[in-house]
Image: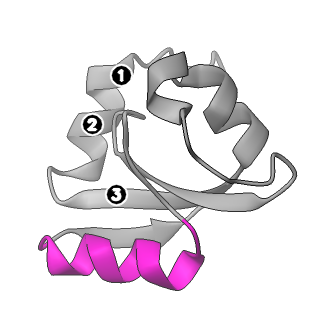
Amino acid sequence: MTPMKMNRQDFADLGAPDLVYVRAIRAADVIADAPVAATAGLSIDPAATLYAVHGADGERLAIMMDRETAFATAVAHELEPVSVH
């Protein structure tokens, strides 16, 4: 069987507009991706685990300090969160 190639829009179409996924990420990765001005004054341990909320197309929508808050925030915004390992 030949693997099917999917682009970001294909994934978004599969997930429906209200589906988001939550996954653990390293604070160091978030800090590395952020503009320097955005991290000024922040006191986050680079080794800490944070939780990112992503749209079905993979776009990072939010970053939370804990998993429960990430799920609650998604629900509060009328989104359907799922966990990704």
How far across and how far down the image is residue 77, in percent?
Answer: 14, 70
Residue bearing mark 2: 12
In this image, 49 relative to 66: left or right?
Answer: right
- From the viewer's side, name the closer residue of 29 and 21: 29
Amino acid type, label 2: Ala
How far across and how far down the image is residue 66, in percent?
Answer: 59, 75
The answer, for residue 85, to whether it is visible in the render is: no
- From the viewer's side, name the closer residue of 68 and 47: 47
**Secondary structure under the numbered disc 3 in the rendered image:** strand
Residue contact at pointers 1 and 2, CB within 8 angstroms: yes
Specify the quadrant that holds the C terminus.
bottom right
Q: Residue at horizontal 44%, vertical 71%? A: 70
In this image, 25 relative to 13: left or right?
Answer: right
How packed is label 3: few (under 14 Cα within 10 Å), some, or many (20 or more)? Answer: many
Magenta residues (range)? 65-78
| Distance of label 3 from label 2 (alpha carbons) | 10 Å
How packed is label 2: few (under 14 Cα within 10 Å), some, or many (20 or more)? Answer: some
Amino acid type, label 3: Val
Residue bearing mark 1: 8
How far across and how far down the image is residue 74, in percent?
Answer: 28, 70
Q: Which mark is residue 20?
A: 3
